[in-house]
Image: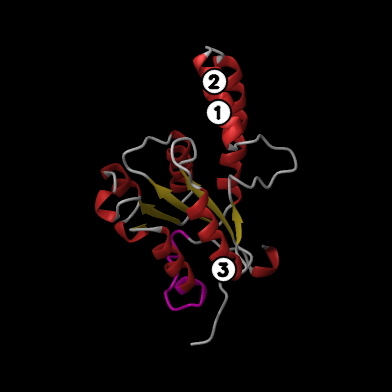
Amino acid sequence: MGKKNLLNKTRCYLVGHMQYENGRRWREEVESELTKLNIVTYNPYKKPFVKDVKEDEKARRNAEKQMRNGEFDKVSERMREIRNYDLNLVDRSDFIIAHLYPTVASWGSAEELVTACRMKKPVFVSIDGGKKKTPLWLLGMFPPKCIYNNPKEIVSMIKKLDNGRIKMDSKRWRLLTEELR
């Protein structure tokens, strides 16, 4: 079967823990593979906006210091801005890839996934420790076929969708024609 490139120029937002776990490595690996398919990735470590709020380790340490010092208004103002930018990336994306650590709360990731779910966007979730560690609530949000053991399994599925070996679920995929992407 010839390569179809169905996902050419689509946009994917990479969701996952940033505050408690280093999410750079899995994002860079996924980004590298999706770039080969000409899929645009939105990586929170590489903000795409002209004006944006830094979300790097230095900024995170500063926010933690402000929290310890009781400077809650400063942290709140900064986090509201980050939240607005990140949710805008969910809006702009054609699909979402998330990698979650089930034992660590990540409120931003949770809201991004809820937003994507309500918008009926395709969401691919991998769970650190494997699919059997999936938080039960996620199984109420997404069908089990959308949950994977690791990001590599998701990339494999994306490649199969891109080349037409697996048919896209028309209930969730709402791709613009290629010339409009």
Q: Nearer the viewer, mark 1 or mark 3?
A: 1
Q: Amino acid at mark 1?
A: Arg
Check disc 1 and report its element: helix, strand or loop: helix
Main SS class of the magenta portion in the image:
loop
User: What residue is rendered at 61% in x and 22% in y?
Assistant: 77
- The x, y position of residue 22, in whole percent, is 48, 43
Q: Which residue is mark 1?
A: 61
**Above or below 117: residue 1:** below
| Residue 51 as seen in the image, left or right of residue 26 | right
Look at label 2 and name its amino acid. Answer: Lys
* Circle 1/circle 2 CB separation < 8 Å: yes
Residue drawn at point x = 57 percent, y = 53 percent: 93
Name which of mark 2 and mark 3 comes first in the sequence. Answer: 3
Where is residue 131 drawn, in percent x and y? 29, 55
Crowding near pointer 3: few (<14 within 10 Å), some, many (20+)?
many
Quote the CA–CA distance across marks 2 and 3: 42 Å
Residue under label 3: 7
Tell me the element at label 3: loop
Estimate the spatial distance between the alpha carbons at disc 1 and disc 2, rounded to whole Å: 6 Å
Percent of width and height locating residue 109: 46, 40
Q: Mark 2 falls on what kind of element?
A: helix
Q: Which residue is mark 2?
A: 65
Q: Classify the position of the C terminus by image quarter.
A: bottom right
Which numbered circle lies on residue 105? Answer: none
- Residue 175 highlighted magenta (yes or no): no
Residue plotted at (54% across, 20% down)? 65
Q: Amino acid at mark 3?
A: Leu
Q: Are marks 1 and 3 in contact (CB under 8 Å)?
A: no
